[in-house]
Image: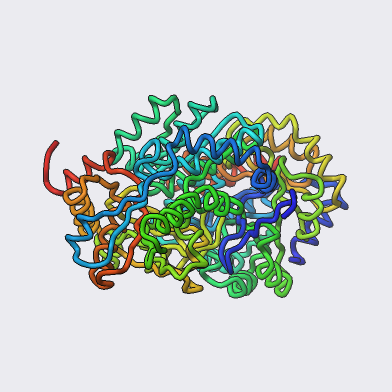
């Protein structure tokens, strides 16, 4: 691999770069800068140093003994991204891309956010690296995630409420793209998931692969073997691809869990890989929730971070190549997963990985003892307490 | 390439005449308005008409055209409906070449070959697909060549010279030059850099050049006509419709086009 870009723009038939002409040059620059950075030991050293001392990596691998006993089956292990600085895996990517932006000489950062975790992570690294930061967030999501919205403001970011469309993550991405088309000369867009035009899905996956690399080594050290099954929630799919990618050559079974919302049969869900079909949105060819005319459908999930009608193109490829399988877990089931982990282990998960926890509990029972399940616990649940309280009929 | 477009640009160049290209989102504000508005634009002096194909996520468009897309989609206006409007407008005597402008996913969902074939059969002349750069356009371009339809690439101020050559090789009838980095509908764009931008493109290609994005007034259109072959106006057409009484939309659009086209 030379300094020239050696990144493949596609994952099988998925991926690519479907973008307005104004943004082509910026993507070529980014492709080149990232190709150089990934071959530059000083870049990796700076990133590793900050991951260790600023983010708090490596995050622990925790054997969930009590949840395991409760399920009465396979051993359940948690990769604790909830313990990373700012409370979720999002900072791995935000930090890496912010360092790239500095390399590109771009002083202004924009980002979209759904649950607010990526927005908070981006605002955090921008505060630390002295970069201007503007975050686009659907007004519906700001209501659901008022705590994170306030955190971003405290960190010095400008938070722009998005009122178009369904006022959620998809529309925040549209608005961020419109900003980028306008300010591309000075601005880098830190996309928060492994989605978007090439080279974003590759860049985000690489920065998130630290999850799977650490977890794989930790499993070998603590369990003495690789996981039999790895399970992670999938919205755009950055924590899942970060966990899965280093395991692709292993015999480990990979399961992505999408948001079933009110139930896949109701049409009110975000289960893109389970119920969608391929199309092009936000610059990439991937599975989408769309109608017969190719219009993108509105989605629903109890977790703002999974509420997205597309998915990272590499997941589409892992699905069609049958290397990974994808299932849906609905809102009610996710709440059960949330409650189970909270009560048995004293770990309050975010609603996003609560989907993965519920499915892992099912799989643990099916597999029986002497097997090992690795869950990507992508974030902590403080931000979701209002949503959970409302779902349980409690007024705070 | 569309013969209608080729002949039009050739004769305009011979006569030293500059062209005017208004844009209308299909089905806006109501389904029944579209054909009347297309005819009104031609009556006012439109040389080429762009019909916007509604899409749920128009990421290169500003608030005005986003809203028009949303209103059209609330009435379930589809790509198939766009073909119906073109067919009806042709049946009522519309002569101007028609370009369908929009985003890739509705085309992909309908089928690329089918889309191009149906567009041709309806009487349209070409496509501008905002999020389909030449690198990704293989199958769609092939279909356009098969059916003698024009594929109109966009050129941006951020396009490097080598890239402009590639875009020019992909295009056939003309290039759509984006006046500035930004979305559609930004008012009062100064256009001070436009002559340099156009000069940079002219060094790479002889194709006719249309300029759009941020062109709202007759004065701006005049500045475009000084340096380029055609001026495109979109959001200002939508705004004209919005400002008009329900019974006077077609008349208002016709008067607006008469003014801005300089006829």
Please name the residue shown 42% across and 26% down the image. A155
Q: Nearer the viewer, residue A142 or B215?
A: A142
Please name the residue shown 86% across and 50% down the image. B15
Q: Position of residue A101 (x, y in %)?
A: 60, 36
State which quadrant residue B174 falls in: bottom right
Please name the residue shown 34% across and 45% down the image. A379
Which image quarter holds the N terminus of chain A? Answer: bottom right
Q: Nearer the viewer, residue A296 or A230?
A: A230
| Residue B81 seen in this snapshot | no
Tell me, what colour scheme is on the image?
rainbow
Please name the residue shown 61% across and 52% down the image. A199
State which quadrant residue B245 falls in: top left
A24 displayed left or right of A290 = right
B16 displayed left or right of B56 = right
A338 displayed left or right of A300 = left
| Residue A31 seen in this snapshot | yes
State which quadrant residue B76 falls in: bottom left
Which image quarter holds the C terminus of chain A? Answer: top left
Q: Nearer the viewer, residue A326 or B202?
A: A326
Q: Position of residue A342 (x, y in %)?
A: 20, 48
Q: Nearer the viewer, residue A151 or A359?
A: A359
Q: Position of residue A257 (x, y in %)?
A: 35, 62
Q: Position of residue A135 (x, y in %)?
A: 45, 35
């Amino acid at each position: 691999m030379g300094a020239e870009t050696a990144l493949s723009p596609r994952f099988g038939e998925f991926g690519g770069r479907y973008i307005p002409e104004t943004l082509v040059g910026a993507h070529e620059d980014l492709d080149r800068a990232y190709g150089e950075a990934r071959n530059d030991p000083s870049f990796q050293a700076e990133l590793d140093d900050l991951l260790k001392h600023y983010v708090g990596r490596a995050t622990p691998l925790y054997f969930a003994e009590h949840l395991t006993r409760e399920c009465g089956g396979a051993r359940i292990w948690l990769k604790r991204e909830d313990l990373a600085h700012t409370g979720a895996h999002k900072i791995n990517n935000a930090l890496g891309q912010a360092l790239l932006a500095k390399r590109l000489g771009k002083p202004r950062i924009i980002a979209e956010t759904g649950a607010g975790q990526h927005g908070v992570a981006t605002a955090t690294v921008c505060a630390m690296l002295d970069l201007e930061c503007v975050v686009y967030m659907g007004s519906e999501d700001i209501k659901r995630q008022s705590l994170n919205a306030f955190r971003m403001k405290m960190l010095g970011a400008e938070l722009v409420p998005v009122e178009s469309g369904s006022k959620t993550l998809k529309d925040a991405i549209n608005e961020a793209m419109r900003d980028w088309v306008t300010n591309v000369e000075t601005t880098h867009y830190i996309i928060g998931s492994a989605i978007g035009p090439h080279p974003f899905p590759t860049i985000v996956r690489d920065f998130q692969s630290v999850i799977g690399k650490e977890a794989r080594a930790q499993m070998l050290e603590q369990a003495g073997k690789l996981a039999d099954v790895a399970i992670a929630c999938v919205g755009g799919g950055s924590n899942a691809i970060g966990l899965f990618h280093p395991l692709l050559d292993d015999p480990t079974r990979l399961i992505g869990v999408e948001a079933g919302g009110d139930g896949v049969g109701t049409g009110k869900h975000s289960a893109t890989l389970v119920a969608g079909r391929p199309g092009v949105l936000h610059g990439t060819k991937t599975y989408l929730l769309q109608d017969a005319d190719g219009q993108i459908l509105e989605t629903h999930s109890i977790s703002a971070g999974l509420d997205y009608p597309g998915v990272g193109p590499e997941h589409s490829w892992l699905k069609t190549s049958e290397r990974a399988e994808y299932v849906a877990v609905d809102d009610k089931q996710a709440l059960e997963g949330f409650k189970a982990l909270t009560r048995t282990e004293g770990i309050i998960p975010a609603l996003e990985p609560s989907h993965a926890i519920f499915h892992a509990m099912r799989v643990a029972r099916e597999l029986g003892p002497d097997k090992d399940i690795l869950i990507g616990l992508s974030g902590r649940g403080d931000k979701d307490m209002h949503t959970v309280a409302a779902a349980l009929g409690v007024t705070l | 390439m569309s013969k209608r477009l080729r002949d039009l640009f050739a004769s305009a160049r011979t006569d030293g005449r500059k062209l005017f290209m208004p844009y209308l989102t299909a089905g806006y504000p109501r389904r029944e308005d579209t054909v009347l508005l297309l005819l009104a634009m031609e009556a006012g002096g439109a040389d080429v008409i762009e019909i916007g194909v509604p899409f749920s996520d128009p990421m290169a468009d500003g608030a005005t055209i986003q809203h028009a897309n949303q209103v059209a989609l609330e009435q379930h206006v589809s790509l198939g409906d766009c073909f119906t409007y073109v067919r009806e407008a042709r049946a009522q005597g519309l002569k101007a070449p028609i370009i369908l402008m929009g985003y890739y996913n509705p085309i992909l969902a309908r089928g690329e070959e089918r889309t191009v074939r149906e567009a041709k059969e309806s009487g349209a002349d070409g496509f501008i697909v905002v999020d389909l750069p030449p690198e990704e356009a293989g199958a769609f371009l092939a279909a356009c060549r098969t059916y003698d339809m024009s594929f109109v690439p966009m050129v941006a101020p951020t396009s490097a010279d080598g890239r402009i050559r590639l875009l020019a090789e992909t295009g056939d009838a003309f290039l759509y030059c984006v006046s500035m980095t930004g979305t559609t509908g930004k008012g009062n764009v100064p256009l001070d850099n436009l002559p340099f931008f156009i000069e940079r493109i002219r060094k790479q290609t002889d194709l006719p050049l249309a300029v759009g994005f941020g062109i709202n007034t007759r004065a701006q259109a005049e500045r475009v006509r000084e340096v380029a072959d055609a001026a495109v106006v979109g959001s200002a057409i939508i705004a004209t419709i919005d400002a008009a009484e329900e019974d006077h939309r077609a008349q208002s659009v016709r008067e607006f086009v008469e003014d801005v086209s300089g006829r």
